[in-house]
Amino acid sequence: MTLLTLDDLPDVNGVRVFVRADFNVPIADGAVADDARITATLPTIRELRERGALLVLASHLGRPEGEAHDELRLAPVGARLAELLGEPVASLGETAPATLPDAPVVLLENLRFDPGEEADDQGFAGRLAELADAYVDDAFGAAHRDHASVSALPELMLASGRPAVAGRLMQREVEVLSRLLRDPERPYVAVLGGAKVSDKLGVIGSLIDRVDALLVGGAMAFTLIAAEGGEIGSSLCERDRFDAVRAAKDRARDRGVLLEVPQDVVAAAEASLNAKPRTVPAAEIPRGLMGLDIGPKTVEEYARIIADAKTIFWNGPMGVFEFEPFSAGTRGVATAIAHAHAFSVVGGGDSLLAVKRAELSDAFDHLSTGGGASLEFLEGRALPGISILEDRR
C-alpha cells in the first residue's frame, strides 16, 4: 500500500490545512496526564508550520456520545500543545465553527460532541470541509473508525479537488505494519494478551498464517486453557468461544506454528494491591482463585522464545499489571522483547503504558499509537482512514 503523504502536498504557505490528530489523551485535574499521543504528531504539525501552513487541528476525546461534557473538552490539550509547539494554540469552544479566528494554529472542540462525527454524517463533514483547503490525517488510532472526520471529510475534500494526505505518524504506522504483513524477518513471534479472546480471534487467525510462534497471556489465555479441559478457578472465560479457539489451535498445529499458553500463573481471590497471590499451574487453579498474571516459569519460557526472534509484535498485557502483585509477567515480557535482537513493535494503550512504566520505550523499534487500528490492519482489513489516502495515480 502506498499512501499520499505530506510530500504530495502542493505549496501550503498561507493555506488553511485541516489536521485530524489523535489527541485522545488522559486528562487529570484539568491537565494532560500523558502527552505521548500529542508528541507523536508534533513532526507533522511542525513540518506544516515550517512550510507556512495555517492549521485547523481536530480530534476526539473519550466517548461523549454526541453531547458536550466539560471534563472531555480539549482546552487542556491545546494548552499542552502550545507548550510543546512553542507558539499559541487557539482552543475553540465549537466543533465546526462558521468562522475561524485570525490565528495560525486553532484547535476545534471535541469532535464527538457532535453526533455527526460518529455517524459519519455528510452534513457535519461538509461543515468541517469549509474550514480548510487541504486535509492531513495523522490519527492512526482512529483510522479504523468510519467517522466523519476520518472518512467522509477527506472524501469530500478529494471530490472538490482539494488534497487529502497522510501525516508523518500515519505514514510511519502504515510502513511499519505493512512490513509485518508482507516481509517479516524470521523467526517472527507475536505476543498477545488482554482480557477477551473474542476481541482478538480475527488477528489470531491472521497471525497464525504469518508467524512462527504465538505466545498468549492475559485473561484471554484462560479460554484456551479451559477449552482443553483445564481447571481455571474463577478466572475470566468465554465458554462460547471454545470451538473457535480449538479450531485456531488445530490450525496452528497444522501450519507448524508454536501456539503457547501459560504453564503457570499468579492467582488470587481478587485483583487488588492487598491480594494474597499464589503461583499455581495454569490448568490447576483452585476454586475461588483467578489467574491474574503469567507465572515465572511462563515468563522464562516466553523469554527463551522471544530471544531467538528476529521480528516481534506485542499487543496486550500479560496480567493485571496495574497492581504490583500481578505486574511481573508483563514487565518480564517487556524486558525480554527490549533485549531481543529483533525488529520490535508494540501496540495498544495498556502495552504502551507497561513499556513506559518499565522505562523501556527507547528499546522498541516502533510504539504504535493505535491498538484496535493496528490489530485490524494486521488482520488485513481495509481501514477507512487509510484506504481514502491511497495513492491511485
Image: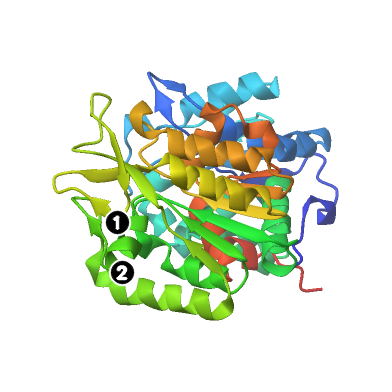
Element marked by disc 1? loop
Q: Amino acid at mark 1?
A: Ala
- How many labels were placed on the picture? 2
Foreground residue among 335 and 23: 335
Q: Dot 1, how many residues are within 10 Å of its Cα: few (below 14), some (14-19), or many (20+)?
A: many
- Relative to 61, 191 lies left or right: right
Q: Is residue 349 visible?
A: no
Q: Observer-nearest residue: 156 or 328? A: 328
Q: How is the image coloured?
A: rainbow
Say which mark, if any, is on residue 44: none
Q: Give the image location of residue 226, x and y in percent.
A: 27, 63
Is 77 situated above or below 156?
Answer: above
Does the residue at mark 1 contact the one at mark 2 (Cβ under 8 Å)?
yes
* Front residue (pair 147, 34): 34
- Left or right side of 52 for 236: left
Which numbered disc covers residue 283?
1
Q: Is residue 151 above or below residue 270?
A: below
The correct choice, above or below, for 158 with respect to 12 in the image is below
Q: Which residue is mark 2?
A: 228
Disc on the earlier residue, 1 or 2: 2
Q: Quadrant of the C terminus?
A: bottom right
Q: Residue furthest bottom?
A: 254
Quarter of the image with the N terminus is bottom right
Q: Amino acid at mark 2?
A: Glu
Residue 325 visible in the displayed image: yes
Q: In screen coordinates, is 63 left or right of 383? A: left
